[in-house]
Structures are given as C-alpha cells and as structure tokens.
Amino acid sequence: MGNNLLPHAGDYLRFLPEILLSVFGALVMLLEAVAPPGSSGIRKTSLGVLSLLGVVLAFFANFYAMRHPGLAFQNMLSVDGYATFFRGLVLLVGFLCILLSFSYLNREQAQSGEYYTLILFSLVGQCLLAASADLIMVFIGLEISSIATYILAGFLRDDRRNNEAALKYFLLGSLATAFLLYGIAWTYGLTESTNFDQIQRVLAYQAFRSTGILASVAAGLIFVGLGFKVSVAPFQVWTPDVYQGAASPVTAFMSAGPKAAAFAVFFRVFMISFGPLSDRWDRLVWICALLTMLIGNFAALRQTNIKRLLGYSSIAHAGYVLIALTADSDIGMAAGMFYLASYALMNIGAFAVIGYVAARHEQYVRVEDLSGLSRRQPVTAALLAIFVFSLIGVPLTGGFFAKFYVFQAALESHLVWLTVLGLINSAIAAFYYLRIIVAVYMREPGPAVSALVPPSPGVRVALWMTAIGTLILGIFPSTVLTFASMSAAALR
C-alpha cells in the first residue's frame, strides 16, 4: 500500500512546467550568487534571457503535458484542458513581463537575477493554482505566488513608493490568506475532505443540506481569501495603491498573472466544489459583481495618475468576470476564460507604454504626460489606442468579444438586471479611457514625450505581441473560445 503513495512517472510529466520553472529559477539564483561583484548590466540581463528560455520551455511542456491528461500526486493536481489554458496564459504573461523588464531595470540601474527568479517562482505558484484539484494545493500555490509577488512589489528598495506598495500588499494579503485557510479548515471539518470532487459529492447529498448554512459560511470565507487576490469589492482597497507604487513591469505582471490564476481557482471551487450550494452563494457573487464594477469605474473617473486609473479599471474588469461566475454555466465559465485572456493582453500592452513613457524613477505617470505621443511616436500611440479601445470594448478588439460573451452568458442565465447594469458600467468606463486617447492625439507634446527615445527591442516585441493578440481575439475569437468551451464542458 505504501508504494501506491509514491509518485509515478506520469505525475512528474504532468508536473513538468512547474519543474522546469523551479529548475531555471534556482539556476538563475545560483548564477547570480557566483557572479563576480560589480558585474555589468549586460551580464545581469543575460540572466533574464535565461529566464525567458525557462518560461518558453515551460510553455511548450504545458501543452506536451496535456497529451497525458489526468490526476497527479494523490489527486492533488489535475491536468486537463482547463489547467492547460490557464497555465499557458500565466506563462505568456510572465514571458511578456520579463521582456518589459530588461530596459526598465537597466534604466533604474536595478538589473538583478533575483528579480527574474522571483517572477519564475511566482509563475510556479500560479501554474499550481491553475492545475489544483485540492484546497491544500490551492493554499500552497497561492502562497508560493503571493510571497514572490510581495517581494516584487517592493523590489526597488530605495523607492519609498515601492516599499509602501509591498507593505500594504503583504499586510492585506496575509489577512486574506488567513480567511482562506480558515475556510479550508471549515470545509474539511464539514466534508472530511479537501478534494474538489469529493467536496462536491458530499455537499450533493440531500441529507447534508441540513448543514448547508455551515457550508455556506465556509464558502464565504474562501470567497474572501480569493476575492482579495482578484480585487473584487469590498476587498479591492489595496489595488490602486499597490499598482501605483510598484514598478510598471511588476504592476503589469500583478494585474494579469496572479489574477488569472486566482480566477481559475474561483471557477473550480464555486462551480464544482460548492456547485450544489449555488443557490446560496450566487446572490453574494451578484452583489459583489455589481459593487466591483461601480466602485472601479466611478473611482477611475477621478484619477489623474494613469497607474491608479488602470488600477481602478482592473477592479471594474474583475466585476465583469464575476458576472461570468454568477451565470454558473459552461458558457459563463468559457466566457470568463476568454475575458481573462483578452484582459491580460490589452492590460500588459497598456502598462508597457506607461513604463516606456514614465522615464527614470517613473516621473511621468499622469494622463497628461501622454500628451502628443502620436506626434513623436505614432506607432506606439497607435498600439496604445488599440489597447485602450479594447479596454472599452470597441468591435474588432478582444475586449469587445470578451464583454459580449460574458453578457450573453448572463442573459442565458436570466441575469437581465446584472447585464443591463454591466452595460451601463461599460459606457461609464468609456469616459475615462477616452481621456487617454484625447491626450495622445489631441494635445501638444509635453516634456515626457519630447524626451522619448525609440523603445527598446524587448518593449517593441511585447507591444507588438500584445497588440496582435488583442486584434486576433477581436477578429478571430473562435479558436480560443472553442478551446475554452471544450475545457469548461469537460470540467463540469
């Protein structure tokens, strides 16, 4: 019997992306340690190139592992289309953010192998979250990702904004983790299991419904823990401050990777494990989705700092994804997956432009600092316009179909009022997004734009990758949506 507890070769194969990321993270850390003091920035940048190689190999290993689907490590991990989708998404986010980091760290004279190691280890945690089939693995993955991200938020130690962002993120994140852990413990006490499928089977017993209130409390505690990670109201207070204080590539990373991984868990936990109690938690999610959209959009209207504006925008977009969760259907899950992919591309692209314009020590991060960008850097301005129009939801961009599919799923689940209110919120959001377009195309160049040099190769590649991806999802959305739909249907 003891031999049955030992991992099999297939377990390691399904775990291959995380193994590769861990190996490359340790290798980068080791090379950083043995590098002679005062090593040049070029040598430090080579560690970033090595990290890129690790992410690329993990990306291909992710799809290779999909050829051998199934459970691994005593049913703690599940490799299927759903896990493959989110693993691939967070790895793409990591790849793009490492590209953006080369020139940024050189400009700030902060090039370091530790930075790339932290990104790789954070990706390990996010991949674990995407493939988790057990609440214990959720906690492990969340902690691996969060601890690395806390440090990344304060990586520029001499910058007080970085220090403040890291401290706020750490304190509030630790509080949210306590709620999550308490919810996991409560769930285990009620169901005698932390496995997603087993929890669902126990909760589905009619005799168990007498203790449904206790199970609802457990679900609520888990909702608080995960709600913090995805910035849903009323757990969103950390987002604008941390987004503003962290370095731009780190902000881009936090806004897309950890959020996608946490939403992957959100869908698994609430649509599978707590699915039998959906009539109890769907009202809570309905209210949180509405509050999240309202708080995010109305607060963004008043912002002059573009990083804070996109921070509140991120909150609002989390509300749209919650609409997909509220729909509680295969179509809703697929729509949420498509939305997260679209949002990752357009948001990273927007932060790439912000980091490029901001100059050293991020002096220029106001909306007005983008004034006249179209006259000095017309191609960069056009790419930024694509990202902004996608955030609004203009046709022929990924953001349009992302919102379309979410609202369609809501209507098919008879969430008419939530759909109407979501559409109104989308119209409100257009006001603050269009302020960016006005500054870029209708105003004279300011000091920030006048001093710009052409973007570095890494920034250029990241901008074009995200822009092309945003347009592909807006013109040919069927490939990604079909894969998401098949993955969601197989999961349920």
Image: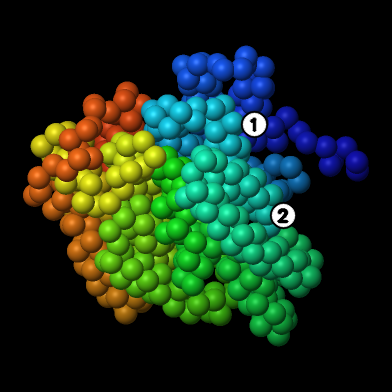
Residue 121 x, y percent position in the rendering: 61, 37
Residue 401 x, y percent position in the rendering: 27, 54
Quarter placement of the C terminus: bottom right
Query: Residue 106, can we see it?
Result: yes
Residue marked by disc 2? 136
Tell me which residue sits at (24%, 72%) in the image: 424
Tell me which residue sits at (65%, 59%) in the image: 174
Residue 117 x, y percent position in the rendering: 59, 32
Query: Residue 350, can we see it?
Result: no
Three-letter code for the amino acid on which mark 2 is drawn = Ile
Judging depth in this view, the residue of 163 and 472 nearest the camera is: 163
Quarter placement of the N terminus: top right
Tell me which residue sits at (10%, 37%) in the image: 375
Q: Quadrant of residue 176?
A: bottom right
Residue extending furthest toward the right: 1
Residue 386 x, y percent position in the rendering: 21, 44
Judging depth in this view, the residue of 426 and 38 nearest the camera is: 38
Point out the tag, 1 or 2, that comes first from the N-terminus.
1
Residue marked by disc 1? 22
| Relative to 261, residue 117 above or below | above
Tell me which residue sits at (54%, 37%) in the image: 119
Q: Dot 2 surroundings within 10 Å: few (below 14), some, or many (20 or more)? A: some
| Relative to 172, residue 118 above or below | above
